[in-house]
Image (spheres, rainbow, N blue to C red):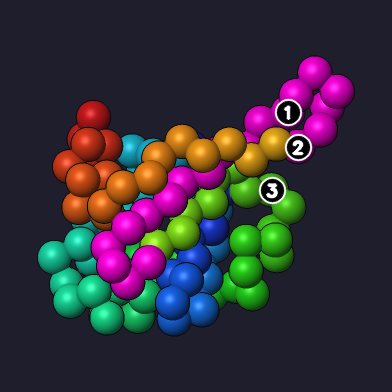
Amino acid sequence: MSTCATYRFVDSNVTYYIHYDGYLEGAAIYFSKIVDDPIEKWSENFGKKNDTAEMTADHSAHDNTEYRYDIYTDGTVIVQCVHYDNFERLIWESVYCGSLKDFVDTYLYR
């Protein structure tokens, strides 16, 4: 499924773009590959363990993304999803805020 997303590792200032499976359950698969790694390796390992991940400048570098993931070194992830309001304005809405481990446990193979 072509649901584009960006994954920003905030404290290391590294952002990845993946062209598909960016919805919550798809992202949980990507994150499941790093969640048991040492937190300081998450940004590096995300790119190594997800072969479709491309480094990019930041969330705004791609205008086709539907999800944005911000991952912090304290283990927190904040997820935003795009939608349009009645006036056709682009709105980013927070849909998840919690630990990356809980995110994976909640959405993996849901």
The residue under the point 62% across, 61% down is: 59
Q: Which mark is residue 84?
A: 1
Disc 2 residue type (three-letter): Leu
Q: In the rendered image of this protein, does residue 89 appear above or below residue 36?
A: above
Q: Which residues are magenta?
A: 72-90
In the foreground, 54 or 11: 11
Q: Are marks 2 and 1 in contact (CB under 8 Å)?
A: yes
The numbered mark, 2 or 3, whose residue comes first in the sequence reads: 3
Q: Is residue 54 left or right of residue 101?
A: right
Q: Could you classify mark 2 by the number of other residues whose Cα lies within 10 Å: few (under 14), some (14-19), or many (20 or more)? A: few
Q: Which mark is residue 20?
A: none
Disc 3 residue type (three-letter): Asn
The outermost residue toward the top is 86
Measured as percent of width and height from the top left, residue 84 is found at 73, 28
The numbered mark, 1 or 3, whose residue comes first in the sequence reads: 3
Measured as percent of width and height from the top left, residue 100 is found at 27, 54
